[in-house]
Image (cartoon, helix red, strand yellow):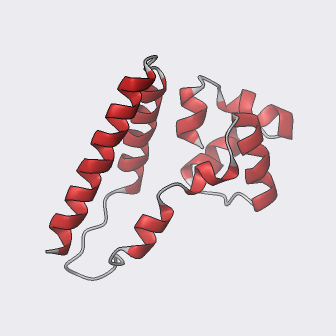
Amino acid sequence: MRARRKALRVSQGALGQPLGHTYQQVQKYEKGIDRIGAGRLFEFARLLGVDILYFYEGILDQLSGHPFGFAEDEAPAPEHRLSEVADLTAAFLRIKDPKVRKQILELVKSAASEKGKARRR
């Protein structure tokens, strides 16, 4: 949610206002302190101009991998990854040329699949 909000350059207060939420509540949702119910998530998707599935992109890939929690596994720091995702999304959405966006998307997908192959070996 944060990545899309930042990409659209909308403040937390402006996003929460139509739903009667303060910026503090939106901040809690974005940080994962408070859970977002399905109905509320649907409303946020509508306000952010995305399909509800936007918030679930890539989750099947994460769920099909090896679960974290074993001593030999290292889970990446979630807050660090979210910041990177927000920055990447914001920069990507500023690219005007659709061909360049498509090339970058293919590059990222390729890099991700190569990393996954290397991890499985």
Q: Where is residue 65, by image quadrant? A: bottom left
Residue sitting nearer the eye, 101 or 88: 101
**Left or right: where 4 falls relative to 73:** right
Residue at the top extreme of this rendering: 96
Residue sitting nearer the eye, 80 or 114: 114
**Residue name at image x 23 percent, y 81 percent:** 71
On the image, the x and y values in percent for residue 52 come to: 69, 51
Position of 81 relative to 103 (above/below): below
Q: Where is residue 86, by image quadrant? A: top left
Residue at the bottom extreme of this rendering: 70
Position of 84 relative to 55 (above/below): above
Is residue 83 in sight in this rendering? yes
Q: Quadrant of the C terminus?
A: bottom left
Q: Quadrant of the N terminus?
A: top right
Position of 6 relative to 54 (above/below): above
**Residue name at image x 39 percent, y 25 percent:** 99
Position of 24 relative to 63 (above/below): above
**Residue name at image x 24 percent, y 74 percent:** 73
Residue sitting nearer the eye, 28 or 73: 73
On the image, the x and y values in percent for residue 97 come to: 43, 18
On the image, the x and y values in percent for residue 78 come to: 40, 55
**Left or right: where 59 falls relative to 107:** right
**Residue name at image x 66 percent, y 58 percent:** 34
Residue sitting nearer the eye, 29 or 104: 104
On the image, the x and y values in percent for residue 10 come to: 64, 25
Is residue 20 in sight in this rendering? no
Q: How many marks?
A: 0
**Left or right: where 33 falls relative to 17:** left
